[in-house]
Amino acid sequence: MATDWLGSVVSINCGLTLGVYQGEVSSVDHTSQTISLRQPYHNGIRCPVPEVTFSAMDIKELKFLDIQNTVNKPSSGQGAATEPSFIPPGRHGQSNSTTHPHLTSSSSHSSTAPITILRRAPTGSVNSRGATQAAPKKPSLRNGGAGGPMRPKDDECFGDGTDEDLDTDFDFEGNLALFDKAAVFSQIDGTNSNSSRAQHHSMPSEQKPMSYRHDENILQVKPVIYRQITVPQHGGKDYCTDSGLVVPSVPYELHKRLLAAAERWGLSLERRLETIGVCSSQMALTLLGGPNRLTPKNVHQRPTVVLLCGPHIQGAQGISCGRHMANHEVEVILFLPNFLKMQESVTSEVNLYSRTSGKQVASVKDLPASPVDLVINCLDCHENQLLREQSWYQSAADWANKNRAPVLTIDPAVGEQCQTVEAKWTLSLGLPLPLAEAESRVYLCDIGIPKLVFQEVGIRYHSPFGCKFVIPLHSA
């Protein structure tokens, strides 16, 4: 019965994806469930191939536009015309999960079997009565023109629904040149200024609000007074801190009266030695490398420090520093001559130092011959300048100058003469003394003297230390 529909003009709707085809029925294959149209049209445009074959699985709707030689033609002894019948693909063992609508026709008869489309056969003769035909590619046209060139495979897969007229490349440089950065930022600044004026409407329109950095204080403060320490007797030289505060030097006599006043109020020599030992050891540990050097993983490279101390208060200060450094796993070697009469404070500090892992030697010959990490010089004494002429002092100073290790001098002696031991750093206590001109870097240590104690000796004092206990000083 399928041959009775040859020559009929039909319209096949294959859904939104494949579109609508019109053409003359050239063959209907009941076995392969296919139908072929010759001289087909796709969505109203003539196809570039002479014949297209469809499968029953993809046809959504079929309409007869012109039926030739079929009306009133009997078929199998029946007087009514019939339409071609297609067996649903599921009946032949093929899986099809899509539910298809029934076939509709412009005639009074309808079929209950769904029909789907098979892809277009290759260009050339199409055998509609042989074996199942290979699925032809979808006919696709470029820019809607008939007989146009075929798209590449990537266009067929990804080019559906895109604008195919964009043949020129995008001009990034030209588009970037259209962006006026200066104008945009000026507009942003103007917007910010306008919003600031709106919030502070009392501000004159011609006055632009001040802008502050993240580290600046936005509160109005009084002018900074950089000379906040005044002394009744000037030592002859001024220093300044990193923040610009002026720290004047004082003569040794005024410094001595200040320490005596502090002792009367309870800041005894022992408490002062402990404070000096803590602050100076903290500075020395920082000079040795701090956390980068003193770690549990670096026990095989423990720093070595040599202490050169005399039998006086300055020597006791150095011994206190060495005790705290030894407690922090630093290899400390204390040089202290044992044939001299020592002060009681020195004896007490030596007894405490002997309970640490630090070593003690009485001869320069027992000091390391190779360079050490740091040398702390506490040989000088403010009260007795004649110690410099003794042999043990000169031997220790010569060893320090020849060891090629950096030297830290704690509480250096005053005087116009040059220092016997060339120091890279010097640490003054409380207020700096008038030191001899040298290339060493001067630091100041807070030894805990209260403000009113300074006032008692005629010094108007405001602490320059801030959040630290040891600060650097610079020549003003």
Image (cartoon, rainbow, N blue to C red):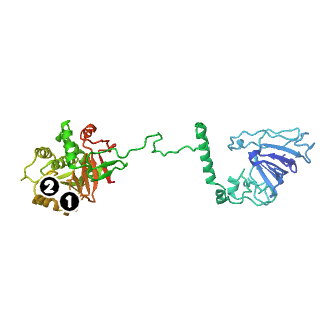
Asked which quadrant contains residue 398, the reply is bottom left
Q: Is residue 97 left or right of residue 310?
A: right
Q: Position of residue 403 (x, y in %)?
A: 20, 62
In the picture as drawn, the residue positioned furthest to the front comes out as 232
- What secondary structure is marked by label 1? loop
Q: Is residue 148 above or below residue 242?
A: below
Residue 428 visible here: yes
- In terms of depth relative to the viewer, which is nearer, 219 or 121? 219
Dot 1, crowdedness within 10 Å: few (<14), some or many (≥20)?
few
Dot 2, crowdedness within 10 Å: few (<14), some or many (≥20)?
few
Q: Is residue 228 above or below residue 177?
A: above
- How far, Cα to Cα, is label 1 from label 2? 11 Å
Q: Amino acid at mark 2?
A: Gln
Asked which quadrant contains residue 201, the reply is top right
Any mark on residue 417, and which?
1
- What secondary structure is marked by label 2? helix
- In terms of depth relative to the viewer, which is nearer, 367 or 439? 439
* Quadrant assignment for the C terminus: bottom left
Q: Position of residue 450 (x, y in %)?
A: 26, 38
Q: Amino acid at mark 1?
A: Gln
Q: Is residue 121 above or below residue 102?
A: below
Any mark on residue 385, and which?
2
In the picture as drawn, the residue positioned furthest to the bottom comes out as 402
* Quadrant assignment for the N terminus: top right
Q: Is residue 271 left or right of residue 149?
A: left
- In terms of depth relative to the viewer, which is nearer, 87 or 308? 308
Q: Position of residue 72 (x, y in %)?
A: 93, 42
Residue 292 visible here: no
- In terms of depth relative to the viewer, which is nearer, 7 or 205? 205
Q: How many marks?
A: 2
Point out the tag, 1 or 2, that comes first from the N-terminus.
Answer: 2
